[in-house]
Image (cartoon, helix red, strand yellow):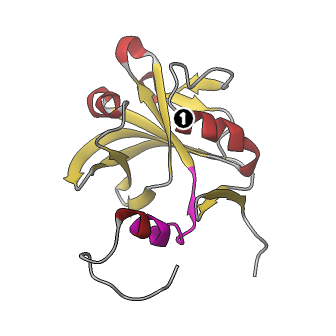
């Protein structure tokens, strides 16, 4: 792709996605409970810390996401930061499926939300605010419980999953 400055009238959504893909991100699976308290989850890379005091985080969900209503109505969610050893289960949560939790080890966390055993970090949150923004909604959560363990993070860059490189 030719790197040149252009305004919004001259680039296509795919070009924007390609440029955004040059920002390497971690990968997480966000989980909640849906109808009949069944576990719900989806893969995200739009996760960030908002505040340390009070502890708050945010992530975004597409307005077209099938599980959007579950995240809106349950009022609690977990952000499960995934390791490079868990690429396949992360992909499982990224694909449409009636049972994304098939073969996935998890335990109930805050208010029963699924916490994935394989996560290298977990933040259990109560939904504080939902902010409409373009074709997504930003979900802000108040962090109520945390957990972390050793492991190498799964990284997403230019449309591919990668392992974290060497320290420079």
Answer with the quarter of the image where residue 73 lies.
Answer: top left
- Residue at 72 percent across and 64 percent down: it is 164
- Residue at 62 percent across and 26 percent down: it is 106
Q: Which class describes the residues within 10 Å of circle 1: few (<14), some (14-19), or many (20+)?
A: few
- In the displayed orientation, state which residue is furthest to the left: 132
- Give left or right: position of 64 versus 109: left
| Range covered by the magenta-colored residues | 16-27
- Give left or right: position of 29 versus 33: right
- Give left or right: position of 21 versus 50: right
Vertical comparison of 148 with 32: above or below: below
Question: Closest to the observer: 98 or 145?
Answer: 98
Question: Closest to the observer: 22 or 60?
Answer: 22
Q: Is residue 150 visible?
A: no
From the image, which quarter does the C terminus lie in? bottom right
Q: SS of the residue at dot 1?
A: loop
The answer to whether residue 19 is magenta is yes
Answer with the quarter of the image where residue 69 lies.
Answer: top left
In percent of width and height, residue 41 lies at 49, 32
The answer to whether residue 7 is magenta is no
In percent of width and height, residue 22 lies at 54, 72
In percent of width and height, residue 129 lies at 24, 46
- In the displayed orientation, state which residue is furthest to the top: 36
- Give left or right: position of 22 versus 162: left
In percent of width and height, residue 149 lies at 70, 47
- In the displayed orientation, state which residue is furthest to the right: 166
Question: Closest to the observer: 101 or 51?
Answer: 101
Vertical comparison of 4 with 70: above or below: below
Q: Which residue is mark 1?
A: 95
**Numbered-mark total:** 1
- Residue at 32 percent across and 27 percent down: it is 74
Vertical comparison of 156 with 75: above or below: below
Vertical comparison of 125 with 17: above or below: above
């Amino acid at each position: 792709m030719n790197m040149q400055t252009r305004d919004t009238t001259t680039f296509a959504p795919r070009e924007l996605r390609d440029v955004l893909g040059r920002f390497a991100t971690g990968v997480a699976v966000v989980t909640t409970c849906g109808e009949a308290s069944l576990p719900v989850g989806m893969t995200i890379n739009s996760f960030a810390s908002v505040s340390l005091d009070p502890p708050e985080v945010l992530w975004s969900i597409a307005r077209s996401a099938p599980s959007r209503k579950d995240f809106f109505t349950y009022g609690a969610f977990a952000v499960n930061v995934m390791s490079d050893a868990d690429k396949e289960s992360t992909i499982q949560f990224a694909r449409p499926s009636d049972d994304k939790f098939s073969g996935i080890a998890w335990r109930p966390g805050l208010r029963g939300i699924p916490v994935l055993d394989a996560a290298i970090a977990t933040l259990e949150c109560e939904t504080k605010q939902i902010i409409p923004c373009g074709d997504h909604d930003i979900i802000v959560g108040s962090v109520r419980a945390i957990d972390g363990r050793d492991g190498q993070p799964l990284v997403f860059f230019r449309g591919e999953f990668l392992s974290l490189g060497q320290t420079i």
